[in-house]
Amino acid sequence: MQRSESSSIARVLTVVFAALSGLYLLVGGVWLVVSGGSPYYVIAGIVMLVTAVLVQRRKPFALGLYALLLLGTIGWSLWEVGTDFWALTPRLGVLVIFGIWLLLPFVYRRFDAPARTPAMALGATLIVSGVVLVYAVFNDPQELNGTLSSASASAAATATAASIPDADWPAYGRTQHGTRYSPLKQINAENVKNLQEAWTFRTGDMKRSTDPGEITDEVTPIKIGNLLYLCSPHQILFALDAATGQEKWRFDPKLKTDPSFQHVTCRGVSYHDLTAAGAGNNGQAAAPSAAPAMCARRIYLPVNNGHVYALDALSGQLCKDFATNGDLDLQAGQPVTTAGQYEPTSPPVITDKVIVIAGSVEDNYSTREPSGVIRGFDVSTGKLLWAFDPGAKEPNAVLGEGQRYSINSPNSWAPSVYDAKLDLVYLPMGVSTPDIWGGNRTPEQERFASGLLALNATTGKLAWFYQTVHHDLWDMDLPAQPTLADITDQSGNVVPVVYAPAKTGNIFVLDRRTGKPVVPAPERPVPQGAAAGDHVSPTQPFSDLTFRPSRKLTGADMWGATMFDQLVCRVMFQHLDYDGTFTPPSERGTLVFPGNLGMFEWGGLAVDTDRQIAIANPIALPFVSKLIPRGPGNPIEPDKNAKGGTGTETGIQPQYGTPFGVELNPFFAPTGLPCKQPPWGYVSAIDLKTNQIVWKRRIGTVRDSAPLPLPFKMGMPMLGGPMTTAGHVFFIGATADNYIRAFDTDTGDMLWQARLPAGGQATPMTYEANGKQYVVIAAGGHGSFGTKLGDYVMAYALP
């Protein structure tokens, strides 16, 4: 009696699941077909409904029919996505599990006729499904296998870092060339697996009630002599003993935040040795044994309230002879001085004579925001030497009494780089805000937007400008520190180049003397049809060195944890405007891919100048932008009592002063999962002599993103960059799971990983102290990225 009741319950559950699934797939499938999508879900829905009826009537043909559905789904899936395991899983997962359920004895033995033959057919189909999935696990079409050459470059390529002691990391990118490469090799591909935690430092700087959601710990420390320098999210500056992590001193600028701030972050600080000026080392000499005079060596700290502080590197005391008692006010000359709307978040470039600094201007708030002016100040006194205002008719014009820099000009928020030989500073430029509508931008606001700007560091005069996006309506600025390198091409010529990774996934390779492309970047037609009052450039430059998508996304690229939410994503995709990269924003909603987060972010490239190779970590996460016409509840001007700012870079953005607000969000399903199939992030290597991508690997798991802590390696989104070494190993945190990892530079094989106590959305660095090599990363998390917040600085070394 109990066995009969169990069988009846099982049959009811089977019928209910098959019927509800069939109805869902049929209704959703019809909607998808009407929208122009695949008819598969209609067919699957009908088959599931018929299967439910046959099971209810105890007809064994239910098993045979379901076997045909599963077999057809296998063929359709392989046709759509090939042997990509994570793309096959939502298509086959539910069907395979239900097929196994149908073969359980208390289900199939209750049919009113022998079911051996259809059961065998279904069993065989399940075996085929298993074989396909197992094969897919070990044959990932999204990865690229290859091995980098171990040949070394000519001496010309290594000379740029010769003046920096191997043991040190004295600038954000180690050198002012932004390479993120260390010649240390005590830690190498053979022994990196033995790395252990050496020390942990906690800053005590955590999220405050007055902070916005976008609070981030993105710092890369610098190391000179026996001291390590780093800033925390609220720009508290710490000096640590490099060998032990013990605090030597700290300086707190007492930043007062507000929820309207768009960012609270500090990517790093800058160092300068006044005694080394003119010695050919860009002021980055190691500390001598004799103690220098007060403020002979300085740390420059940018603060989010629009100030820069100069402090003595040994004591942490303010340098009273710099600006106003060590405090340089960058709000001077700004047309708008609302707190949080102008924020220097990246360390300035320091030459022998000049501090070159720019700053972040709040995105998408209004057409009346601070200037993105770039300024050069005397490195000793803080006196203004020059200004370059990207939105002015005469960018180098000196302000008269009562004059202000141009409102809303393009800004440079990411770290810059410097070539001392050419005396040129290279600044990655953003776009005049608001970003997503540009019908009222002036020619001056367009002139130096979204591209790479080269200025004479001593005079601020324009050397050249290369625009990477024309009339940018997607926030596709240059988001990362460029990298300078002298590359030996295949003809044996040494070419001084600058690598500029872009949000579009393009890496623009330019002769840094002239700004002319070394790797071709032809102009190609792009989609048209701008919103009312705006226009779209007919063409955009596309570099031949690129990680951008090789084709347009289709419905087949949509994803989900199951076939059910995948169907929702396919329907959503069909209802968005999308015609490939640079599809213009619309009121209907536009799929932006590469997304507003970009394929490259502020982490940049790691370039081994000895071997002439680069490590990159592109991401692939689409966004959706939807223009919101002005109307009730959506005024064109802010309330006069508004503090300004949105406290976020996603969601509703007002874009005051334009005909449209905008809603910006990642392209997620209602379940909160990305609608584009993984990978959403990977690491890759480039041979810079041939400009070929040699290998590519998924990175990151869903351990800290999924409801259950599952270690599935899917390829996660990242914020942060890689760091590479002469030991043929590179390190990276950055992923949406809380790990730091080490990879073999030659092959991309993962060699080591360590669990972090919070998100590692920062770029690691390495140095040597007392004969031991350390790898250090900040683990403080990222508010809007959703990783765990913390206040940790972690150091690792060999035992």
Image: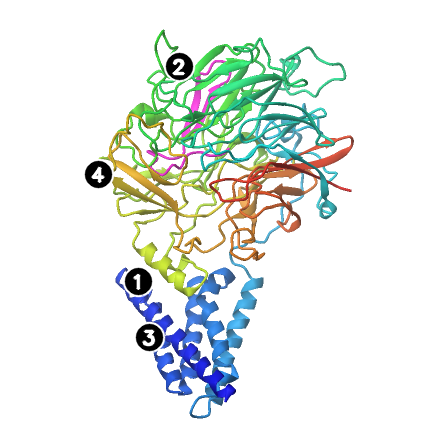
Mark 2 is on which residue type? Answer: Gly
Residue 44 placement: quadrant? bottom left
Asked if residue 576 is positioned above or below residue 461 in the image, the reply reads below
Asked if residue 487 is positioned above or below residue 131 in the image, the reply reads above
| Residue reaching furthest to the front | 1
Label 4, label 2: how far apart the Cα atoms are? 36 Å
Q: Earlier in the sequence, mark 1 or mark 4?
A: 1
Label 4, label 3: how far apart the Cα atoms are? 45 Å
Residue 653 within the magenta-colored segment of the rendering: no
Residue assigned mark 1: 32
- Depth check: 243 or 792 in front? 792
- Depth check: 492 or 748 in front? 748
Residue assigned mark 4: 632
Q: Position of residue 97 (x, y in %)?
A: 49, 72
Label 2, label 1: how far apart the Cα atoms are? 55 Å
Residue assigned mark 3: 46
Mark 4 is on which residue type? Answer: Pro
Under circle 1, the secondary element is helix
Q: Position of residue 681 (x, y in %)?
A: 51, 48
Residue assigned mark 2: 333
Q: Which residue is pictured at 51% across the width and 87% down the height?
A: 3
Q: Earlier in the sequence, mark 4 or mark 2?
A: 2
Quadrant assignment for the C terminus: top right
Mark 3 is on which residue type? Answer: Ile
Q: Magenta segment range?
A: 452-480
| Label 1 crowd bin: few (<14), some (14–19), many (20+), radius 10 Å | many
